[in-house]
């Protein structure tokens, strides 16, 4: 066994502070119990930025997964990130209430995300034809699969920890005019 | 067409595993960043709190939860390589608890995470802790759940072939998961 050291925790906390401007309670919670999980989450979320989805599309998928998993924390944190990336508050609230966004591209991505999670990737020919008609590519499905996996980590840890939503996130949501649906 | 990032992801995989697993090859071909996400996750968990045998037993159990034949072969082989007994590998493939008490406790915790969608309440956390699965171990199990959810979906989307190096492992076990005849749709909310 080679558990991460306190130094590793300090490095992750510092990188979170640099990335977000504050250390989110989620990252603190992960670091308190298992810094390797915090490191995994920070590294994977950073690498996802190199994927094929635009920032707004990626945040829309992250929010869709978080709502699917009913995560009270990530549905707020990523509501704020969505708006910052250019998603309208209306579309954010649509996703967070289990509905579909008005923006066609985001709507297609939200439907693809829910389909992938519902069927765990076992798509039939009809599903593939539907996705092709919506312009969803295999590369995009792999981004969605990666997001589904990585966000399940934060979503489920938040279930266990009942993580308090950070005040800076609540302040941002207020400024953005997003209701921030309860999950 | 592949991007310039594909060879780099494959090269990192080869340095880590000795081969380029078909999972990474498939991801790198279509979306190298997704391959890097998987490699990042795997690398970070090498510093986790669970031993390699414990991690692999959890991963094998999750391969069965996800009905991923590809992952079941990979993690059966890795279980054996890091000291999980052949009997316990068979038990896991058959959906039974391993004999080894520590692995049994971890598998029970993994089952709770999967069945309860992560909603292990304080009482559950304390019960697991009393069995030696503390919150750090529980979070690592959740991390493995997420990583295997990712690979399981990719396996189902692409129908990954067993890696050539693992074909003998595949032949050794006759209780590997198959694609079900009908896929049950698991939806937890309307919308």
Image (tube, helix red, strand yellow):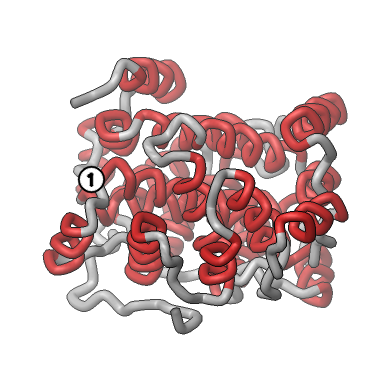
Q: Could you tell whether A14 is left or right of A114 in the image? A: right
Residue A84: image quadrant is top right
Towards the viewer: A40 or B115:
A40
Residue A46: image quadrant is top right
At 65% from the left and 63% from the top, the residue drawn is A75
At 56% from the left and 29% from the top, the residue drawn is B43
Q: Secondary structure at mark 1?
A: loop
Relative to B124, say whether B12 is above or below: above
Where is residue B125? Give x, y as percent.
79, 68
Towards the viewer: B43 or A153:
A153
Towards the viewer: A48 or A28:
A48
The residue indicated by pointer 1 is B160
Confirm whether residue B93 shows in the render.
Answer: no
Residue A142: image quadrant is top left
Number of residues whose C-alpha sits closer than 10 Å to that of mark 1, classed few (under 14), some (14–19) or many (20 or more): some
At 63% from the left and 41% from the top, the residue drawn is A41
């Amino acid at each position: 066994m080679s558990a991460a050291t306190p130094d590793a925790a300090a490095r992750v906390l510092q990188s979170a502070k640099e990335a977000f401007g504050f250390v989110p309670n989620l990252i603190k919670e992960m670091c308190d119990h298992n810094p390797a999980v915090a490191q995994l989450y920070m590294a994977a979320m950073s690498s996802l930025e190199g994927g094929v989805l635009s920032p707004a599309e990626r945040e829309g998928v992250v929010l869709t997964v978080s709502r699917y998993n009913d995560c009270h924390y990530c549905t707020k944190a990523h509501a704020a990130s969505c708006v910052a990336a250019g998603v309208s508050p209306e579309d954010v609230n649509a996703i967070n209430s289990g509905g579909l966004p008005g923006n066609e591209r985001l709507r297609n991505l939200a439907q693809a995300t829910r389909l992938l999670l519902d069927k765990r990737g076992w798509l039939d020919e009809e599903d593939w034809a539907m996705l092709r008609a919506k312009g969803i590519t295999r590369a995009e499905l792999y981004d969605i699969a990666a997001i589904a996996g990585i966000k399940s980590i934060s979503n489920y840890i938040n279930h266990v920890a009942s993580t308090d939503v950070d005040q800076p996130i609540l302040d941002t949501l207020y400024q953005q005019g997003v209701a921030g649906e309860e999950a | 067409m592949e991007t310039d990032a594909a060879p780099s992801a494959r090269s990192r995989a080869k340095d880590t595993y000795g081969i380029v697993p078909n999972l990474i090859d498939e991801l790198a071909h279509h979306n190298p960043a997704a391959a890097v996400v998987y490699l990042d996750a795997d690398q970070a968990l090498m510093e986790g709190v669970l031993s390699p045998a414990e991690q692999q037993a959890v991963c094998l159990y999750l391969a069965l939860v996800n009905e991923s034949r590809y992952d079941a072969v990979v993690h059966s082989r890795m279980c054996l390589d890091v000291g999980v007994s052949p009997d316990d590998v068979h038990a896991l493939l058959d959906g039974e608890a391993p004999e080894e008490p520590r692995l049994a406790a971890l598998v029970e915790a993994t089952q709770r995470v999967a069945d309860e969608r992560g909603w292990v309440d304080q009482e559950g956390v304390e019960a697991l802790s009393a069995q030696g699965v503390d919150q750090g171990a529980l979070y690592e199990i959740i991390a493995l759940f997420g990583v295997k959810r990712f690979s399981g979906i990719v396996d189902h989307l692409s129908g990954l072939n067993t890696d050539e190096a693992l074909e003998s492992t595949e032949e050794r076990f006759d209780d590997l998961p198959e694609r079900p005849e009908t896929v049950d749709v698991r939806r937890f909310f309307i919308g």
